[in-house]
Image (spheres, rainbow, N blue to C red):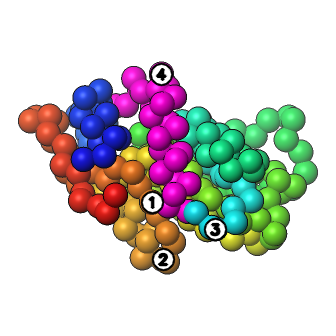
Amino acid sequence: MNFLEKKILSDGVLKEGNILKVTGFLNHLIDVNIVEEIANAFLEAFHGEKITKILTIEASGIPIAMTVALKLHVPMLFAKKTQSLNVDGNIYSAKAYSFTHKCDNQIFVSSGYLSSDDRVLIVDDFLANGEALKALISVVQQAGAQVVGCGIAIEKGFQGGGDAIRAKGYKVKSIAIIDKMDYNTQKIEFRQQNQ
């Protein structure tokens, strides 16, 4: 069992509706030591990929993405969910359904921040049905850039999003993959992975 799986078992809370609440260490209150360990695992998994940019989606992926970017000394870019007056010019955009919030989000990135020269590592905190990840991949493709991989902290393997992305030829490294979780018994089963 790896460090993140142990943390999920000790501090995660299962809620009805296949919700895993990790707000006490990952996506509200941030345990910087766990985030650093996640970042280090991504650095190892994507070593040698000549990454030029880290891309995530607001807001919960930002701490992990920023830590990876800091360690690689490359810029970190996040896709916004709402367009504001301070974003002008051309944009790359895609629609992403949020499993957690049960709604569609139109995400976008200013076109000046991604180019065909970029080698992008996509980073996020969760992967469930894969909609956010597909939208981020679409944004990278619209820019003519290359996705070198996807680093995910927690994947809900039973929802199939990660396997669908892998089937399209993308390298997806998830630190913890949950194959089963049961609210009634409060049990979580993790997929065995090569650590």
Q: Amino acid at mark 3?
A: Glu
- Write down the residue under mark 4: 29
* Front-lying residue, 112 or 99: 112
State whether residue 186 appears in this view: yes
Give the crowd class for mark 1: few <14, some 14-19, many >=20 residues within 10 Å: many
Q: Nearer the viewer, residue 120 or 97?
A: 120
How far across and how far down the image is residue 178, in percent? 27, 51
Q: Which residue is mark 2?
A: 168
- Determine crowd level at label 2: few under 14, some 14-19, many 20+ residues with C-alpha closer than 10 A: few
**Position in image of residue 127 (x %, y %):** 43, 52
SS class of the residue under badge 3? loop
In percent of width and height, residue 12 lies at 29, 30
Q: Nearer the viewer, mark 2 or mark 1?
A: 1
Q: Is residue 182 left or right of residue 100?
A: left
- Disc number lying in front (4 or 2): 4
Quick check: 85 above or below 120? above
Outermost residue toward the right in this view: 89
Asked which quadrant contains residue 78, the reply is top right
In the depicted structure, whether residue 110 falls above or below residue 26: below
Q: Secondary structure at mark 1?
A: strand
User: Which residue is identified by label 1?
Assistant: 173
What amino acid is at disc 2? Lys
Instruction: Tell which circle, 3 or 1, labels the residue nearer the N-terminal end.
Output: 3
Q: Characterize the local packing of mark 3: few (<14), some (14-19) or many (20 or more) Cα atoms within 10 angstroms.
A: few
Does the segment drawn in magenta span residue 39? Answer: yes
Marks 3 and 4: which is nearer the front?
3
**Number of the front mark, 3 or 1:** 3
Q: Earlier in the sequence, mark 4 or mark 2?
A: 4
Q: From this viewpoint, is residue 81 visible?
A: no
| Residue designated by label 3 | 49
